[in-house]
Image (cartoon, helix red, strand yellow):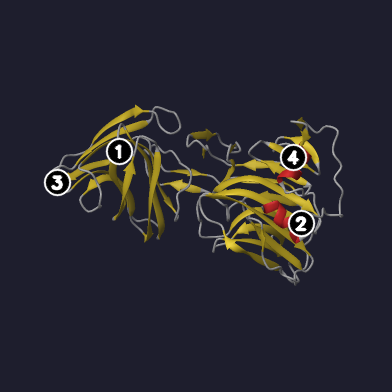
Amino acid sequence: MSIVRSPVRSVVRSPVQSVFGGASLLEQATSALGNVAPYHYLDFINNRALYAGADVGNVTGATGYSFTRASDGYYTNSDGTLTNFGSGALRRGDRGVLIEGSRTNLLLYSQDFAQANWALDNSGAVNPVVTANYGAAPDGTMTADRIQLNKTGGTFCRIQQSLTGLTSGNYTASVWMRTISGTANVGLRNDSTGINCVVTTTWQRFSVTIGPATVAGVQILLFDSIPGNDETADILAWGAQLELGGFVSSPIPTTSASVTRAADVLTYTAGVSYPLQLFAEFERVVDTGNDEYLVHVVNSGTERAFIAVNATDNAVTGQIVTAGNTGTTTSVGTVPVGATRKIAGRIALNNTQVALAGTVGTADATADLPANPTLLRVGAFDDTLRHPFGYIRRVAIVQGAGTDANLTAMTS
């Protein structure tokens, strides 16, 4: 199979390009895209970027770079440890860049189970025993609390925090847990819905979703009604969270009040013209139940093009025109949660196409071209909507319509 590079715009290597292992960044990027040369290329894993074919250093060096998040935010590294990034700092690491929408942790004292907001009770057993700041938490701080549970001779032993009068919706409760030694079967309940958690000496985050509901809460417990729960358990707990939504997002620490983590907003100057090809390599962490935008080039709210994962888990390419034919096409397969995938899309006159993992879809042959974009947005529809809540590893834009072979090569 021959790969035809777009004749629309030739790429001239910049004399300032850095060379690693004998290959320039442009050469590395072209190789990573199956021998298709990108015009823009953002490698969020290795923190390298091309803009207009030139090596501009790291991902903050590309023209028009802008990032905002008006709050701290955690990042989960590939080894499972957490790193906290300060307000306005791009959450980038060995999994790529984390892009999330805004979420609020409704629970108080998420890292301090010794506070009175966390109620202790039992039925025919004994109350839990809580020891604050007993061990190292997933973020390395000494903020994990020891919770000793014992329901021997009774029905349950629990620690809980509940809320009432909530806006009707789905609510997800979560908490990090590990044992001090061995394995324990511990319950996690969100209001009246409980699951058995197999807790080991390795930190794990457990979650349970209910809804639609107006009452929700987090209970860590041993309970006869949760199959598999043990009679006793000695665990560490950290990062309790209750958030409006059908899936868990990154940890949001709280003390005496609820806390909102702001949305990640990452944009660049587009600097391209149609026709073009869009590419993203990403790790899908959750199914948001909505469109999850990965790369979005925009002239206005109604003149734009994008690649995304849609609400039915297909990869999709779309081009939206104010007056004329819009174009949309979806992938043959779907994108699973917990997997890394590559998506590419073609935005051309009467030729909208998508490729997922080396397989192209059926092109839409009735699409007009939007006005040339001015803004490149990574990981959202706009500042507030349709974030992927996952890790975007690499993004590229290729000038020219290219061929199906290009899209297949980029996503294989």
Residue pointed to by mark 1: 183
Label 2 amino acid?
Answer: Met
Name the secondary structure under disc 3: loop
Distance Cα–Cα, label 4 vs label 2: 21 Å
Label 4 amino acid?
Answer: Gln
Q: Nearer the viewer, residue 217 or 1?
A: 1
Name the secondary structure under disc 1: loop
Asked if the residues shown at circle 1 and circle 2 are in contact, with their CB atoms under 8 angstroms apart, the answer is no
Distance Cα–Cα, label 1 vs label 2: 53 Å
Distance Cα–Cα, label 1 vs label 4: 45 Å
User: What number of labels is visible?
Assistant: 4
Q: Is residue 18 left or right of residue 307?
A: right
The x, y position of residue 260, in whole percent, is 48, 44
- Please identify the quarter of the rendering in which residue 16 is found: top right
Q: Residue at x 51, y 34 (%)?
A: 84
Few, some or many residues within 10 Å of mark 4 (<14, 14–19, 20+): some
Q: Earlier in the sequence, mark 4 or mark 2?
A: 2
Label 1 amino acid?
Answer: Thr
Few, some or many residues within 10 Å of mark 2 (<14, 14–19, 20+): few
Q: Earlier in the sequence, mark 1 or mark 4?
A: 4
Asked if the residues shown at circle 2 and circle 3 are in contact, with their CB atoms under 8 angstroms apart, the answer is no
Of badges 3 and 1, the one in the foreground is 1
Q: Earlier in the sequence, mark 1 or mark 2?
A: 2
Residue pointed to by mark 4: 28
Quick check: can you spot residue 73?
no
Q: Earlier in the sequence, mark 3 or mark 4?
A: 4
With respect to residue 181, does 265 lie above or below?
A: below
Q: Which label is found at residue 154?
A: 3
